[in-house]
């Protein structure tokens, strides 16, 4: 009988201890903790919440390569664009793409024209409505 009581006590303590965890970090794209920020990126993409894009662009400057990776993946999934940003590039190489993202946020067309013929072919394209409904 004594062994049975000990078993019950151990089980009760085990169940109680399992329920006594500290709450996880807030799932918010503005959370400085990547453990809260990254799940919030995923939720924003899943819910097609384009309001999160501004913070994702800001986080492309992060010192944390994981934050940069999830930010650019989230932006690509939300917008279909990367503007050449690669999370693993050094800061100098990321800078140009980051400027394009910042221009995108400001509502400018930031697609680089690599050939003078592209300028002729795209003339007036800025006036055309965007079928995706975004900038």
Image: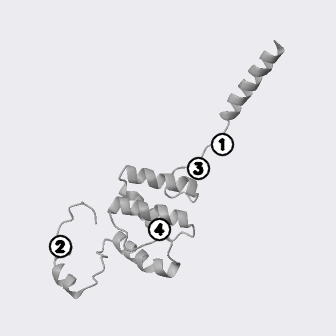
Mark 3 Cα shell of 10 Å, populated few (<14), some (14-19), many (≥20)? some
Place of residue 94 in the rendered image (x, y in percent of width and height, measured from the top left) = 46, 77
Left or right, 5 with respect to 25, comes to right
- Mark 1–mark 3 contact, CB under 8 Å? no
**Mark 2 and mark 4: span between their CA atoms?**
28 Å
Question: The residue tagged with tag 1: helix, strand or loop?
Answer: loop
Residue 42 visible to the viewer: yes
Left or right, 132 with respect to 55, comes to left
The numbered mark, 2 or 4, whose residue comes first in the sequence reads 4
Q: Which mark is residue 135?
A: none
**Residue that badge 2 annotates:** 127
**Residue that badge 3 annotates:** 25
The numbered mark, 2 or 3, whose residue comes first in the sequence reads 3
**Residue that badge 4 annotates:** 58
Q: Which mark is residue 22?
A: 1
**Mark 3 and mark 4: span between their CA atoms?**
20 Å
**Mark 1 and mark 3: span between their CA atoms?**
9 Å
- Mark 1–mark 4 contact, CB under 8 Å? no
Q: Residue at x 38, y 58 (%)?
A: 51
């Amino acid at each position: 009988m004594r062994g049975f009581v000990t078993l019950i006590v151990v089980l009760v303590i085990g169940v109680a201890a399992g329920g006594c965890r500290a709450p996880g970090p807030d799932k918010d794209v503005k959370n400085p903790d990547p453990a809260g920020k990254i799940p919030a990126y995923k939720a924003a993409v899943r819910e097609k919440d384009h309001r999160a894009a501004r913070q994702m662009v800001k986080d492309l400057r992060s010192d944390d390569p994981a934050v940069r990776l999830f930010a650019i993946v989230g932006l690509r999934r939300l917008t279909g664009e990367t503007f050449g940003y690669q999370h693993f590039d050094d800061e100098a190489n990321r800078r140009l793409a980051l400027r394009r993202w910042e221009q995108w946020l400001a509502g400018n067309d930031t697609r680089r024209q690599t050939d003078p013929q592209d300028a002729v072919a795209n003339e007036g394209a800025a006036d055309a409505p965007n079928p995706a409904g975004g900038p």
